Amino acid sequence: MANGSIAFTQTASVRAASHRWKVLGVGFAANASFSAAFSGIPTTAVFLRSGYHLGNEGLGLVLGMLGLGIAVSELPWGLLTDRWGDRRVLLLGLLSTAAALAGLALFVVPSGAHVPGVTTLALGLLLVGLLGGSVNGSSGRAVMAWFREGERGLAMSIRQTAVPAGGGLGALVLPVLAAHFGFASAYGVLALACAITAGFAWRWLHEPTHTPPADAAHRTAQGRAAVSAAPPKVSPLRDIGIWRVALGAGALCVPQLAVVTFGTVFLHDFSRAGVLAISVTMAAVQTGAAIARVWSGGWTDRRGNRRAYMRVCSLLTAVLFASLALMTGLAGMHHASMTAVFALMIVVGGVCASAWHGVAFTELATLAGTSRAGTALAIGNTCVFLSLFLTPLAIPPLLSVGSWPMVWAVASVCALIALPIFPRATRAGSLSATRPCDAPVIGQR
């Protein structure tokens, strides 16, 4: 009888250890689907301007609405995730986002003499952001529940890699669709991607099974010891460490989002790059960011230096964008001959400004504990997407005052501001400062 129980436990453990990769795959697909919308639609900025008859101010407004919708909805979705569970929230969010994108494809596209107004387009993108904000916290909480400390940095970084991966696919596909087939096809493809991902979530995403009784006594003793040594739990909303990571992330996102939202306009208007060169450059930004996020997650897992890594990224990003501002100012009237140089600088700066995301969100979720990870991740995403709202709104006035050197200089300053906001690493490394996992699962030993 005992042997049978042990065999059952081992089989269940193996199955759970295997299933966690399916959960990670669902989280990756969910983030990639939505990222293709909020990172991919801005890469059609040139066609948005012409197709919807927008100026730079109107373009900044409609692109900012995506970020505003996500920022406003992140915290409510995060609180709801901790109450309802990640499966329900992720399914609801993906299906409703698909419906909103389908609505844009059917009713808010230029056709012949009919051109939707800027208000209609802005409200449509705001709705997409409001509904899509559910994806970030719910998928992150699911991944945190299935992976243990020492693996979470890599797992969360792989999940965060979906953001540049989805954005890269969007950068390659959406401008072509918008240019040759119209925006109905672009919105329709995004809606289909969200609907397909909802099918994967329905099939594979569920709460992890806790440890069986035969193994529970040993784990319970370990858990009691860990809890007795841990500081008292406070709400993530009142945790200063979580807010410092979140606010630092919001500031460091400004240069990244300047590239994502107006990088195509910079390459087109200032560098005189063609559509192919622009698409390849923006796809390279997203691809490089994806690789950097996976590497940084595994590296910081081994080193236990998440906080130090975030601080180094902020400093290096500030230097790179200051260099871009200087080069743009010195180029003068000869900038058309430097298209390749500016494209390379956009790629390097954009990658560095994006590499830290998985590490920062792992730190947020670990500080909060698994049961409250949805709220902590929502706080981080609220700050990030407030930047996505404000950045494209701020760029047109900066262009009118000081042209592109001013834009990149302000981006550099924002990256530098993040440096003192991010918490410093403790003497034993940031991992030792975080709270223990509060939900052990089968297969995590």
Image (tube, grey):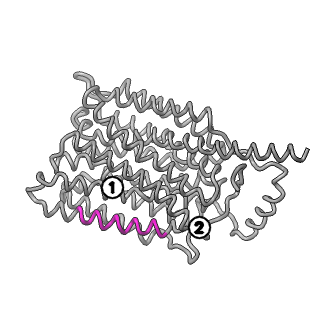
**Front-most of residues 423 and 214:** 214
**Front-most of residues 338 and 381:** 338
Q: Tell me which amino acid carries mark 1.
A: Gly
The percent position of residue 43, horizontal first and vertical second, equals 30, 42
- 242 lies above or below 177: below
In this picture, residue 168 sits left or right of residue 88: left
The percent position of residue 392, horizontal first and vertical second, equals 31, 50
Dot 2: element: helix
Number of marks in the rendered image? 2
Q: Residue at x 53, y 37 (%)?
A: 93
Outermost residue, top direction? Answer: 112
Q: Residue at x 34, y 64 (%)?
A: 317
Q: Tell me which amino acid carries mark 2.
A: Leu
**Mark 1 or mark 2, earlier in chain:** 1
Give the residue number, with chain letter if any, for mark 2. Answer: 431
- 8 lies above or below 217: above
Give the residue number, with chain letter if any, for mark 1. Answer: 350
The percent position of residue 345, horizontal first and vertical second, equals 25, 57
Q: What span is in magenta?
A: 308-324
Q: Where, quadrant-wise, is the N terminus in this rendering?
A: top right
Which circle marks residue 299 in the picture? Answer: none
Outermost residue, bottom direction? Answer: 427
